[in-house]
Image (spheres, helix red, strand yellow):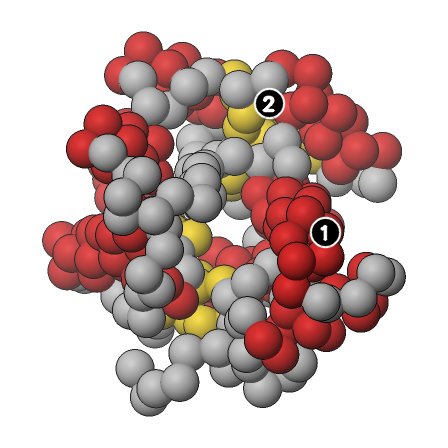
């Protein structure tokens, strides 16, 4: 299926590793010219080089989106190669803290990194999309936004904010030709998740091999209908769909890619 992304330019934030890397790689494979954002120039350049080696088009933009100056630098670098048609707000972070450990300072930092960073890029890039009458804004959210756990309360709340702002933005952009939507992954097997599972597996009796650990964790910790963790490429496919003209009638929606982790009709 041709997703008709040829001729479009996309900025993927937090694209120097993990989920963002998979999204940037998939968009490039579908014909989009991508801007790989990261804070580490070497890592971002390596992702861009791999995309180019596979026949795609890629540039890099370096900066800390938790600051206005960093967002200005990223926007300037991204726009230096031409207009941005697709903005994927993927950049963010989390840590495994409880209510007792997540101080107000931790909450404030989490909102700066996970929510306001995306707002900065929206404010810098979406007005030009609106002027041109075409654009796509995609937030990477998550199931914890609507089914939070007792742990990671600050992270749960920032995901809910991402979902909320995406719907608000969709209403703001009504009739403009620019859409705003969310892709909500479940538990995805990126390197950081794989390492965390390996750390906690011995204490939970999940086995020793990666396959044993994943199956046990999917059953005991993140139960879902498929019985495994998702892969970055599966999330990237959903993003690629929303990024193109086939999704022109999708507005303010949440596309869940979680194996059925969320147990509701929401």
Classify mark 1: helix, strand or loop.
helix
- Residue 146 figure quarter: bottom left
On the rendered structure, is 144 left or right of 205? Answer: left
When the figure is inspected, residue 29 is found, relative to residue 258, above or below; the finding is above
Q: Nearer the viewer, residue 209 or 186?
A: 209
Q: Which residue is drawn at 43% across and 53% down?
A: 140
When the figure is inspected, residue 158 is found, relative to residue 141, above or below; the finding is above
Name the spot of residue 112 as percent of width and height, x first: 27, 30
- Residue 128 figure quarter: top left
Name the image quarter holding the C terminus.
Answer: bottom left
Which mark, by number, is residue 198?
Answer: 1
Q: Is residue 60 visible?
A: yes
- Residue 57 figure quarter: top right
Classify mark 2: helix, strand or loop.
strand
Question: What is the spatial separation of the Cα atoms under label 1 and label 2, in whole angstroms?
Answer: 32 Å
Disc 1: CA contacts within 10 A as few (<14), some (14-19) or many (>=20) = some
When the figure is inspected, residue 108 is found, relative to residue 264, above or below; the finding is above
Q: Which of 229 and 40 is in front in this view?
A: 229
Name the image quarter holding the N terminus.
Answer: bottom right
Which mark, by number, is residue 189?
Answer: none
Q: Nearer the viewer, mark 1 or mark 2?
A: 1
Name the spot of residue 172 as percent of width and height, x first: 13, 53
Q: Residue at x 63, y 48 (%)?
A: 196
Determine which residue is flagged by label 2: 60
Q: Which of 52 and 205 is in front in this view?
A: 205
Name the spot of residue 250 as percent of width and height, x first: 35, 71
Q: Is residue 253 visible?
A: no
Q: Residue at x 40, y 85 (%)?
A: 263
Name the spot of residue 6 as percent of width and height, x first: 62, 50
Q: Which circle's residue, 1 or 2, is located before the other in the chain?
A: 2
């Amino acid at each position: 299926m041709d997703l008709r992304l040829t001729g479009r330019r996309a900025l993927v934030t937090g694209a120097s590793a993990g989920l963002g890397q998979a999204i940037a790689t998939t968009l490039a494979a579908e014909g989009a010219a991508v801007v790989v954002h990261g804070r580490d120039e070497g890592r971002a350049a390596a992702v861009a080089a791999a995309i180019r080696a596979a026949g795609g088009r890629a540039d890099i933009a370096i900066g800390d989106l938790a600051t206005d100056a960093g967002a200005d630098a990223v926007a300037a670098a991204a726009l230096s190669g031409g207009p941005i048609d697709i903005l994927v707000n993927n950049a963010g972070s989390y840590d495994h803290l409880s209510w007792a450990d997540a101080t107000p300072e931790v909450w404030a930092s989490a909102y700066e990194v996970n929510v306001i960073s995306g707002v900065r890029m929206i404010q810098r890039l979406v007005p030009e999309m609106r002027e041109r009458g075409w654009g796509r804004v995609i937030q990477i959210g998550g199931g914890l936004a609507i089914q939070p756990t007792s742990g990671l309360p600050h992270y749960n709340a920032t995901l809910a904010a991402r979902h909320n702002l995406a719907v608000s933005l969709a209403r703001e952009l009504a009739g403009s030709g620019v859409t705003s939507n969310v892709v909500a992954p479940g538990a995805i097997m990126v390197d950081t998740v794989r390492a965390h599972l390996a750390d906690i597996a011995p204490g939970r009796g999940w086995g020793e091999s990666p396959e044993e650990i994943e199956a046990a964790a999917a059953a005991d910790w993140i139960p879902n209908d498929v019985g495994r963790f998702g892969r970055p490429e599966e999330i990237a496919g959903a993003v690629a769909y929303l990024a193109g003209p086939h999704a022109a009638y999708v507005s303010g929606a949440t596309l869940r890619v979680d194996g059925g982790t969320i147990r509701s009709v929401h």
